[in-house]
Amino acid sequence: MSSYGKLEVAIEITVGAYEFYDMVVNRPHHVPNNKLDGVATNQADSSSSAKVGSISSWKYFQDGKAKVCQAMIEALDSKKHSTTWKIVEGELLDHYKSFKFILQIITTPNPKATVHMINLEYEKMHDDVADPYFMLQTVTDNIKDIDAHLLTQSRT
């Protein structure tokens, strides 16, 4: 029997919501490779905006081993700074029937924004499969790295 799960975390970022959202959604190939081993997209022109159906390949590490997943943009709302990626291929699907990342950046009255990041929504293949805390940590670390990278760029 399989079970559904959801993990979420909210992270404060120091750069603006638009700047952060643009990097993650429209320019993922520019994402710093501190926790990821690279990102590639199927967009013909890497400077073009992402669209529903766009697929990106994310290389990440789990327990010191390189892994890959293909993520398709399932929903996109640039006004609300919200995107849903559905995993369509890769090692995650060896353990999960379905796996989604939902990113939403919520702006606050001060210059900072909060990434009400990523809800990870998943369905396990069976009850013995662990909840994907490793992926939540990977994404959390990556958001902090992107924020630091963008902050450094804005100061130069």
Image (cartoon, rainbow, N blue to C red):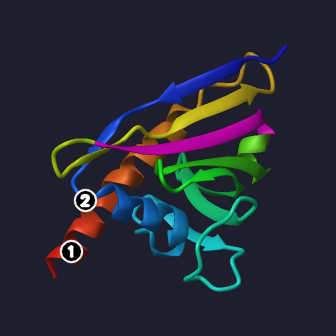
Q: Which residue is mark 1?
A: 154
When asked about the image quadrant of residue 31, the answer is bottom left
The span from disc 1 to disc 2 (Cα, nearest Å) is: 9 Å
Q: Residue furthest bottom?
A: 45
Q: Going 80% across and 18% down the picture, which residue do you hit? A: 2
Q: Going 41% across and 54% down the picture, which residue do you hit? A: 142
Based on the picture, tell me whether residue 35 belongs to the magenta stretch: no
Examine the rendered structure and indicate whether residue 89 appears above or below residue 98.
below
Report x, y in % for residue 122.
68, 30
Provide the major secondary structure of the magenta segment. strand
Q: Which residues are magenta?
A: 94-107
The one of 115 and 124 positioned closer to us in this rendering? 115
Tag 2: amino acid: Val
Report x, y in % for residue 147.
29, 59
Report x, y in % for residue 155.
14, 76
Report x, y in % for residue 118.
49, 40
Q: Which residue is mark 2?
A: 15
